[in-house]
């Protein structure tokens, strides 16, 4: 378990505005893509499913959901400094992730408006939802005396280029794993209200349905492109993106086990439950998924998380950079080795299972 000791005061851009966390491989990233290629996608094979997903987005079931009620109208000064710091970290990363989706979807909608009206409208509605999520979380940060300058994030954050195929795989997984993260926390706190330390969590049940609908739209988009599920390359990419998402989730969840302990969850079990459910959900979209029932699957993910803790310790040990580089090599090799073992374990053939359904 990662134990947080004394928490440093957050760095500020100006009074009340938190400086964004330093970008790393584990922080939420901002993306751009090949907009022309997406505009030229042929959707006819799954147009009915795409239109059904679009109709769900148009319905806007949560238009009145993100309204702060009287339960927020109290002081949170009773949070000790450690709890406050852990909670701010959770809120910041959640807000940044949602805002990243907003920026990508907004730009997709703008670029596709005159070329692919169906996709343009869908991305506009997706951006609407993500903006609500980010704004609602940012208001929660204000309860703890801070907020994020989202305009500053837009201008200063590094944007990573992903080909459209990668965007579809990763956003599908991001939305579905987001659903399971939210709903499992909600169900746990519903059974154990004594651990519900802040009213944001009671919004998770309806909120996670936004994530689910977003994932359903990307599932329809993925299945409309045969190259994303009917080739041997797509089988490798599916496993690769599942693996990277699951490794990233394990590293970030286990290094923040204090947060989950704070709300009465065991981080290891929560991580396993989220990954198992996300992997099973992915059977509906991907041609292959990972074998989460393999006896070494989670042991290897947790070994990656343990190696990551060693890397973090080395980064702050005060040694010269060149010495740190050589100290990190064994632990980086350890992570790559465990990831390779997971990747090359016999996967679950989703297409074969789909063919068995009558």
Image: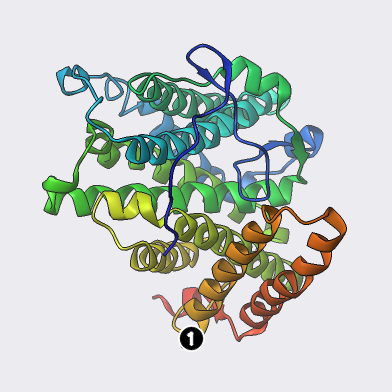
Q: Does the rendering let one see residue 220?
A: no
Q: Residue furthest front?
A: 318
In percent of the image, x 83 and y 68: which residue is there? 326
Q: Position of residue 20 (x, y in %)?
A: 60, 29
- Residue drawn at x 44%, y 65% as measured from the top left: 275
- Tell me if 38 is positioned left or right of 127 in this view: right
Please tell me which residue lies in front, 355 or 349: 349
Image quadrant in which you'd find residue 76: top left
Q: Is residue 290 left or right of residue 193?
A: right
At x 41% / y 63%, what residue is drawn? Answer: 271
Residue placed most toward the observer, 223 or 89: 89
65 and 218: which is toward the camera? 65
User: Measured from the top left, where is residue 171 in percent x and y?
Assistant: 58, 46
Check the picture and name the quadrant holding the C terminus: bottom left
Look at mark 1 in the image and give the residue it sits on.
Answer: 294
Q: Is residue 336 above or below residue 322?
A: below
Helix, strand or loop at disc 1?
A: loop
Residue 331 seen: yes
Q: Residues within 10 Å of mark 1 (few under 14, many from 20)?
A: few
x%, y% of residue 170? Answer: 61, 51
Residue 273 in the figure: left or right of residue 92:
left
Q: Who is closer to the viewer here, 310 or 242?
A: 310
Q: Quadrant of residue 55?
A: top left
Using the image, determine if residue 228 lies above or below residue 358. Answer: above
Q: Quadrant of the N terminus?
A: bottom left
Question: Residue 38 placed where, x, y %?
Answer: 73, 38
Q: How is the image coloured?
A: rainbow
* Residue 139 horizontal side relative to residue 351, left or right: left
């Amino acid at each position: 378990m990662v134990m947080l000791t004394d928490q440093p005061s957050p760095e500020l851009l100006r009074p009340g505005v938190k400086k964004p966390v330093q970008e790393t491989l584990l922080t939420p990233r901002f993306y751009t893509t090949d907009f022309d290629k997406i505009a030229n996608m042929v959707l006819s094979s799954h147009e009915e499913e795409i239109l059904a997903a679009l109709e769900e987005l148009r319905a806007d079931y949560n238009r009145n959901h993100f309204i702060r009620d009287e339960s927020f109208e109290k002081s949170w000064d009773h949070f000790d400094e450690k709890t406050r710091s852990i909670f701010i970290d959770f809120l910041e990363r959640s807000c940044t992730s949602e805002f990243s989706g907003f920026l990508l979807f907004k730009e997709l909608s703008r670029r596709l408006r005159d070329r692919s009206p169906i996709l343009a409208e869908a991305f506009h509605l997706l951006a609407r939802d993500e903006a609500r999520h980010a704004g609602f979380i940012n208001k929660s940060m204000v309860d703890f005396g801070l907020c994020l300058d989202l305009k500053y994030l837009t201008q200063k954050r590094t944007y990573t280029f992903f080909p459209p195929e990668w965007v579809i795989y990763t956003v599908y997984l991001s939305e579905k794993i987001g659903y399971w993260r939210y709903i499992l926390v909600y169900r746990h706190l519903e059974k154990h209200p004594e651990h519900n330390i802040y009213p944001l969590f009671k919004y998770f049940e309806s909120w996670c349905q936004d994530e689910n609908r977003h994932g359903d739209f990307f599932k329809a988009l993925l299945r409309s492109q045969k190259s994303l599920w009917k080739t041997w390359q797509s089988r490798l990419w599916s496993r690769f993106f599942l693996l990277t998402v699951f490794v990233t989730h394990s590293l970030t969840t286990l290094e923040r086990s204090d947060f989950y302990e704070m709300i009465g969850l065991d981080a290891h079990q929560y991580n396993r439950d989220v990954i198992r459910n996300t992997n099973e959900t992915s059977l509906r979209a991907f041609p292959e998924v990972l074998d989460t029932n393999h006896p070494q699957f989670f042991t290897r993910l947790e070994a990656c998380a343990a190696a990551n803790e060693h890397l973090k310790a080395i980064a702050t040990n005060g040694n010269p950079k060149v010495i740190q580089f050589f100290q990190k090599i064994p632990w980086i090799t350890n992570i790559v080795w465990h990831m390779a073992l997971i990747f090359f374990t016999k996967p679950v053939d989703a297409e074969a299972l789909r063919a068995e359904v009558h």
